[in-house]
Structure formats: structure tokens, C-alpha cells
């Protein structure tokens, strides 16, 4: 007759459970994340993924705002150049109003004014960002400076100086309004970037709290699980040895 003794199924169960904890702890330490799968914490993983999506969305919003600021800065630079031309044109017009100027002098000044107006119109028609026209009034443009410059400034004709100055001042005032709008838009975008950046940082912090592992705590857990694994292995080996010896006694 033979007699059999159990081989410590309870010991095996707890040893396997502890090994599973040990593997999970090692995985968290290696990845730096305590949410490596839905099995770790399904609810926290869903919330963390939602936070991650919001962080990426905020980042894209900041990039888009910076792109818009870049467009405005290019447009504003062109308008500034056109405004400088108009200041020069105004100075030339005032010079042409001098009684010391003869018709030949005024004609020479008129040619210079025409060149400056042509240069200004060219800047308005060709200023672009990534192929998008900025100042010609087309779809996607930020202002219609081309139409503002579509005015005649003639200092060569008698009695035309007052009309020329009035046209110049109208253009300069319109350009000033456009530049003011550009400045306001830039300030608004910068404010949006600051607010979005704060939201992004806070949301990323919330995601980190859910997702990132506490290395100090998890290292302690790993050490404990590793110790328990060694104890379990020793207990299991002792249990198997005792069972084998007892079995031999009854053989």
C-alpha cells in the first residue's frame, strides 16, 4: 500500500500570485508608468488617455496661434513699409507745394511719388505667408491694402496739392487702423497662448499623477515582492522535500 502527501498547492498558489505581483512591479519600474494596460486600472487609464488628448489638442492650438502671429507679423511689416513710403510721399508733396518749385521740379517729384506708390502696391499684392496672400483682399488675406492704395496723387497740376495731401492722409489713417487691428489681434493671440499653456501644463500634470509611477513606492513594492518570492520558493522546496520524505516512509 502506498501513501501520498499533497505537494503544497496553497504554497504554489501564493507563490504564483506573488510572482505576478513581482512581474507587474518590474514592468512599472521599467516603463515608468503604472498604467501599462487596462488591467492595471481601467478607469484611471481612460481618464489619463482623455487628459493626454486634451494636452495634444492644446499643443496644436498653441502652434496654430503662433502660425497666425507669424502671418500677422509679416503683414504688419509690409504695412509698416508701405506707411513709410506714404510718409515720404507726404514729405515730397509738401516740398512740391513750395513756391520756389517750378513745373519741372514738380514733375520730378511726381515721378518719385509714382515710383513709391508702385512699390507700395507691389508690396500689398505680393506679401504672402505659405502661399497665402495677406494684403490684396483675396480670400484668406488679413486686409485689403491694395484697394486703399488705388488712389491718384498728383502734385504736378496747379491747385492739386491740397487734394493730394487729403488723399495721402486718408491712406495713412487707413494704414494706421490696419496696423492697430494687427496689434490687437497679436495681443489677443498671445493672451490665448498664455491661457492655453497654463491649461496644458495643468492637464499634463493631472495626467502625470494618474499615469506616472512612484518610483520610491514601487521600488519598495518590488523589494517586498522579490523577498516574498524567495521565501515562497524556499517554502515550496521545503514542502516538496518533506512530502517526498514522508512518502518514502510509507512505501
Image (cartoon, rainbow, N blue to C red):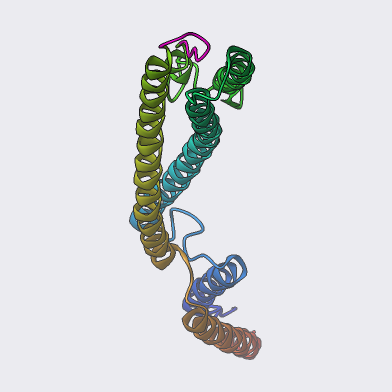
- Horizontal and vertical percent for residue 70? 53, 39
Which residue is drawn at the image coordinates 47% and 47% (left, top)? 59
- Horizontal and vertical percent for residue 6? 52, 78
Q: Nearer the viewer, residue 8 or 12?
A: 12
- Horizontal and vertical percent for residue 23? 58, 70
Q: Which is the main secondary structure of the residues drawn in magenta?
A: loop
Which quadrant: the N terminus?
A: bottom right
Part of the protein shown in magenta: 152-159
Which residue is drawn at the image coordinates 58% and 72% (left, top)? 29
Q: Nearer the viewer, residue 198 or 13?
A: 198
**74 w.r.t. 192: above or below:** above
Q: Nearer the viewer, residue 13 or 191?
A: 191
Q: Is residue 157 magenta?
A: yes
- Relative to residue 244, is residue 180 drawn left or right? left
- How many marks are shown on the rendered structure? 0
Among all residues in the image, which is located at the extreme front? 100
Which quadrant: the C terminus?
A: bottom right
Which residue is drawn at the image coordinates 48% and 40% (left, top)? 69
- Relative to residue 24, is residue 42 drawn left or right? left
Q: Is residue 172 magenta?
A: no
- Horizontal and vertical percent for residue 203? 37, 58
- Relative to residue 28, is residue 142 drawn left or right? left
**136 w.r.t. 47: above or below:** above
Amino acid at each position: 500500500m502506498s501513501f501520498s502527501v499533497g505537494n503544497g498547492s496553497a504554497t504554489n498558489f501564493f507563490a504564483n500570485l506573488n510572482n505576478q505581483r513581482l512581474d507587474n512591479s518590474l514592468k512599472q519600474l521599467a516603463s515608468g508608468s503604472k498604467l501599462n494596460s487596462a488591467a492595471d486600472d481601467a478607469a484611471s487609464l481612460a481618464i489619463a488617455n482623455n487628459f493626454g488628448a486634451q494636452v495634444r489638442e492644446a499643443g496644436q492650438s498653441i502652434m496654430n496661434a503662433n502660425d497666425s502671429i507669424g502671418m500677422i507679423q509679416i503683414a504688419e511689416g509690409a504695412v509698416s513699409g508701405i506707411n513709410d513710403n506714404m510718409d515720404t510721399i507726404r514729405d515730397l508733396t509738401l516740398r512740391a507745394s513750395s513756391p520756389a518749385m517750378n513745373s519741372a521740379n514738380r514733375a520730378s517729384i511726381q515721378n518719385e511719388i509714382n515710383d513709391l506708390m508702385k512699390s507700395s502696391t507691389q508690396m500689398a499684392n505680393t506679401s504672402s505667408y505659405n502661399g497665402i496672400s495677406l494684403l490684396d483682399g483675396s480670400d484668406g488675406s488679413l486686409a485689403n491694402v491694395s484697394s486703399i492704395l488705388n488712389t491718384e496723387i498728383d502734385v504736378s497740376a496747379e491747385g492739386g496739392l491740397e487734394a493730394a495731401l487729403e488723399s495721402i492722409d486718408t491712406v495713412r489713417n487707413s494704414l494706421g487702423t490696419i496696423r492697430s487691428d494687427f496689434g490687437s489681434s497679436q495681443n489677443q493671440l498671445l493672451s490665448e497662448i498664455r491661457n492655453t499653456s497654463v491649461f496644458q501644463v495643468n492637464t499634463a500634470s493631472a495626467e502625470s499623477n494618474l499615469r506616472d509611477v512612484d518610483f520610491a513606492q514601487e521600488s519598495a513594492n518590488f523589494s517586498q515582492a522579490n523577498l516574498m518570492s524567495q521565501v515562497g520558493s524556499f517554502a515550496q522546496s521545503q514542502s516538496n522535500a518533506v512530502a517526498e520524505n514522508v512518502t518514502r516512509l510509507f512505501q
